[in-house]
Image (cartoon, rainbow, N blue to C red):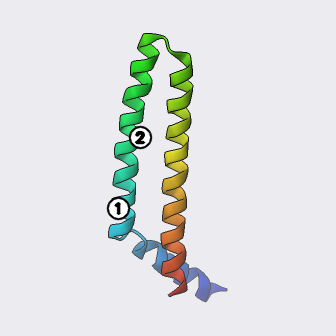
Amino acid sequence: MKKDIKNMDKGTKNSLGSPTIILMGIGAILSAALFYFMFKYADQGNLLMVIITSSLIVVVSFGVVKGIAYISKHKYTK
């Protein structure tokens, strides 16, 4: 059991490689753009577009989390 924990700790340190950093950067840029449009639509009083853009922010964040989990999973199985 302790051996698995040590291997997992080593894997989490190595999971922040370039694919993870690129994925997080793309997610941050997309989220920032969506936040900009969400506030723009809020100033215009367009409730439907605010709800759609906030839903897209959630989708982007889940996508980033799933991508990081996928990358980490493949690093642990090697």
The answer to whether residue 10 is above or below residue 34 is below
Q: Residue 19: where, in percent of width, then height? A: 36, 67
The label number, if any, that marks residue 31 in the structure image: 2
Horizontal relation, residue 33 to residue 64: left or right:
left
Horizontal relation, residue 51 to residue 18: left or right:
right
Tell me the residue at 44%/26% (across/down). Answer: 38
Label 1 – label 2 distance at C-alpha:
15 Å
How crowded is the residue under tag 1: few (<14 C-alpha within 10 Å), some, or many (20+)? few
Tell me the residue at 46%/80% (across/down). Answer: 10
Q: Residue 23: where, in percent of width, then height? A: 39, 59
As helix, strand or loop, the secondary structure at mark 2 comes to helix
Residue most extreme to the right? 1
Tell me the residue at 55%/41% (across/down). Answer: 58
Tell me the residue at 37%/37% (across/down). Answer: 32
Q: Earlier in the sequence, mark 1 or mark 2?
A: 1
The label number, if any, that marks residue 32 in the structure image: none
The answer to whether residue 77 is above or below residue 36 is below
As helix, strand or loop, the secondary structure at mark 1 comes to helix
Which-is-in-front pick, marks 1 and 2? 2
Q: Residue 16: where, in percent of width, then height? A: 39, 68
Q: Residue 35: where, in percent of width, then height? A: 41, 31
The answer to whether residue 21 is above or below residue 43 is below
The label number, if any, that marks residue 21 in the structure image: 1
Identify residue type, mark 2. Answer: Ser
Q: Which quarter shows the N terminus?
A: bottom right
How many marks do you count on the picture? 2
The answer to whether residue 24 is above or below residue 39 is below
Identify residue type, mark 1. Answer: Ile
Check if mark 1's residue and mark 2's residue have beta carbons within 8 Å: no
How crowded is the residue under tag 2: few (<14 C-alpha within 10 Å), some, or many (20+)? many
Using the rendered view, name the quadrant where residue 55 is placed: top right
